[in-house]
Image (cartoon, rainbow, N blue to C red):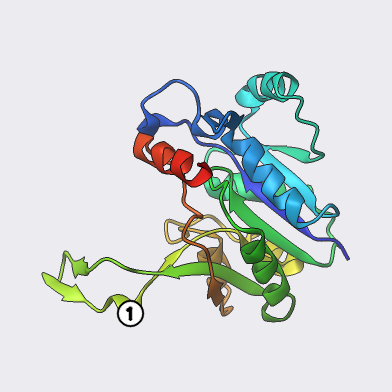
Amino acid sequence: MSDYVIITAGGKGLRMGGDIPKQFLSVGGLPVLMRTIRRFREYSGKLQIILVLPHDQRDYWQQLCEAFDFREEYLLADGGDTRFASIRNGLRLIPEDAQGIVAVHDGVRPFVSVDVIARCFETARSARAVIPVTPVVETLRSVSGHCNVLRSDYRLVQTPQCFDIPLLKRAYAQPDSPRFTDDASVVEALGETVTMVDGNRENIKLTTPFDLKIAEAILS
């Protein structure tokens, strides 16, 4: 039995306003993607890491690895035209007869805690499909209903999302659909139930320049 994590890093960084893809930007002196990979290696030295990266970004990534003497072991898959295609490419690197848990994680979420990673993996061994969530702290308003809604009825969804390997492979054998907003929604299309566990609030997705300021504050 082996466990895997598929780390997706296909962003172009358009909302960051620069030419460098956001997963390669430096936070605290180290590229974001390296921080993310090392967090999962911190969780387990035996975890099989699959990095999904656009083919045209491979050379730049290799240059960064040499510059920062980054020697973590991982398998490399090509990114697809969509996130769905990218995850499917990553899953193809997992043997068809593999048994265990596979996580899917955003490469630009470097601050997921090791406790959350462990919680997701261990819960998935029995629940088969698990996502980390955090409470909504702001007031929510329905645009279509023109009214406030109970924030206690909602949660913010994070990654890593963890699944039984054969289950996620079966889910990604489906055709892509606009309804698929994350891996949990792909699995739920099979009629499966997804279990929620507590995430950590620092596990933000770095998308805008303001997020980078928050990231630096977290590190300091």
Element on which disc 1 rests: helix
Dividing the picture into quadrants, the one containing residue 183 is bottom right
Residue placed at 52% from the left, 29% from the top? 25
| Three-letter amino acid code at the position of disc 1 | Ser
Residue placed at 66% from the left, 70% from the top? 119
Q: Position of residue 11 (x, y in %)?
A: 50, 36
Residue placed at 56% from the left, 76% from the top? 194
Q: Is residue 135 left or right of residue 110?
A: left
Q: Position of residue 152 (x, y in %)?
A: 33, 79
Q: Is residue 147 left or right of residue 186?
A: left
Dividing the picture into quadrants, the one containing residue 95 is bottom right
Q: Which residue is mark 1?
A: 152
Foreground residue among 132 and 128: 132
Residue placed at 19% from the left, 68% from the top? 142
Q: Residues within 10 Å of mark 1 (few under 14, many from 20)?
A: few
In the displayed structure, 215 sits above or below 158; it is: above
